[in-house]
Image (spheres, grey):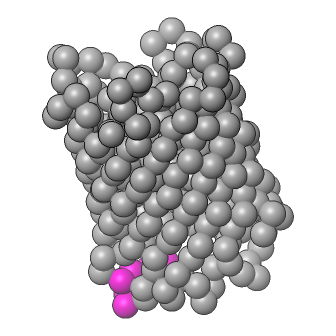
Amino acid sequence: MTLNKLAFSLVGSLALATVGFAGTAPSGKKCTTCTPPPAAENDLGLTLSAGYDSKYIFRGLDLADNWITTSLDWTLPLTSTVRLDSGASYGVSADDSFLGVDGASYQRLELNTGIVADLGGAELGLGYRWYNHQGDGDLVLEDGHEVGLTLASKAGPLNVGVGAYYDFAIEGWFFELGVNSEIKINDTISLVPGANLGYGSDYNYHLEGAEGIDGFSHVGLSLALPIKLTKTATLTPYIAGNLPIDELDGFDNQLFGGVSLSVKF
């Protein structure tokens, strides 16, 4: 059972909401944020993606502007019900903005791997992700080492996912609940509304010396429009809103958008 890559992976607040339903990766959130479906017999199980986001929102926190990312993801079926998902992604702030500071550079490398099991009515995932912060971000952010457990299923027309992630570097937890749905317009275009909710426990977003949050972080809303260009290529523009709440209350609400192009091999 492949839930159109709904299942949370180990990345961020918009991962669920911006995943395209025709094999796309969420721009700026890296397809390592999603779990690609099992590879067809005639392809290599690889997905190459590139994307642009007007803002890079990570679990409700506004990290950077004009975010450009590339990613390569690989799916390897191990059995008829179990697969291995691995990937690498690299992102950079094109105009050198970081945490609201103009001229501060920020780049980010992420590597991930995990096992996803088809349980018949749901998909269960267990994975690991390494976060490597670069540029001026390296001065205030420590690298992350995160293990995550995810569960995704369907409830009528809705795709529902939950995820729990523990970062050993900062000794904090982050939990996420999300829902989205595919509305087919025609054979090549779909409309995908989505929403998610985040919660942190001693989670400090890798900020060295910062006190971790203990409570809800944000509500995320999005609307994606995956367009299947060919059998293997999908273009996905989206618009989204980030609403900080509770522990992040006081940060500005953000309206942002972007586009990604993904090609399967």
Q: Residue at x 30, y 80 (%)?
A: 95
Left or right of 96: which side holds 237?
left
Point out the image quarter for the N terminus: top right
Left or right, 52 with reference to 114: left
In reply to whether residue 228 is colored magenta, the answer given is no
Q: Residue at x 44, y 66 (%)?
A: 90
As drawn, 92 above or below 182:
below
- Left of 22 or right of it: where is 178? right
Q: Nearest the camera: 124 or 212?
A: 124
- Expressed as whole percent of the image width and height from the top left, the position of residue 231 reads 22, 28
Spot occupied by residue 133 in the image (x, y as percentages of width and height): 56, 76
Q: Residue at x 42, y 53 (%)?
A: 72
| Above/below status of 26 relative to 172 | above
Q: Nearer the viewer, residue 161 or 201?
A: 161
**Residue positioned 57% across, 41% down in the render:** 85
Do we see residue 222 in this rendering?
A: no
